[in-house]
Image (tube, rainbow, N blue to C red):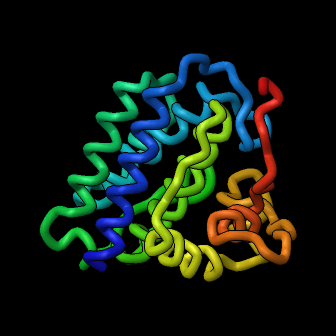
Amino acid sequence: MTALLAYHRTAMATAVDLVNEVERFDLPTPCAGWDLDRLLAHMTAQNLGFAAAARGDAFELRTWQEVPATPQAFADSAEAVVAAFGSDKALSRDWSLLAGADQELKVPGGTALGFHFIDYVVHSWDVGVSIGKRPVFSEELLTAVETLAFEVPLTGPARTGPYAPFAPAVMAVADAGAMDRVLAVLGRDPNWRSPQG
């Protein structure tokens, strides 16, 4: 679990660096229907919600509410979530996460860490390709995230419905690298490019 925490910190630092390079928040992203402004609001809210869950705070829907966010607000939320995940005994208890629009879901801390780690490797890629700066991760980190990504069920609520965290898997090319395999199994098109160039 210590290694996963370290990989998670790397993913968060990469996301912060990429968000700080965004100059236009109206650019499209690989997340269907979302521009960078909406993606940033989502990422910031998720960080705040997961940080509260890791601290053991009582579940409150407003903690997870998406509001317009700035790069600084995102960086602050990233710092909060990394600190909360690394706090004493955080991974040994259940976390109260948001499921769907307004439901509380209790998840073991280690599992929740995995959820957030996957999300931030993919969201780093979302932001990066939107601004033409695809992130680069170590092979060790990608091996860790690939293992978790292939544990996500291919059918059911994780893939379909209005609040599904992942789209249906897409086909990866035969010689795809680890990052492209992760993207494909989680429903992203690894060949997506911003129509802005």
On the image, the x and y values in percent for residue 17 come to 41, 37
Out of 43 and 102, give the one closest to the viewer: 43
Q: Which residue is drawn at 39% across and 41% down?
A: 63
In the displayed structure, 138 sits above or below 16; it is below
Depth check: 156 or 87 in front?
87
Outermost front residue: 175
Q: Can residue 17 be seen in this view?
A: yes
- Image x and y of residue 39, in percent: 60, 35
Q: Position of residue 150 (x, y in %)?
A: 65, 80
Residue in view at x 78 percent, y 58 percent: 161
Residue drawn at (80%, 51%) of the image: 191
Question: How many callouts does the rendering have?
Answer: 0
- Left or right: 58 as drawn, with respect to 100: left
Q: Extreme left residue here?
A: 88
Q: In this view, does 118 lie above or below 174?
A: above
Q: Residue 72 falls in which quadrant of the image?
A: top left
Quadrant housing the N terminus: bottom left
- The quadrant of the picture occupied by the C terminus is top right
With 65 as the anchor, is 110 left or right in this view? left
Which residue is at a point 45% across and 40% down the rendered structure image?
A: 45
Note whether residue 157 is visible: no
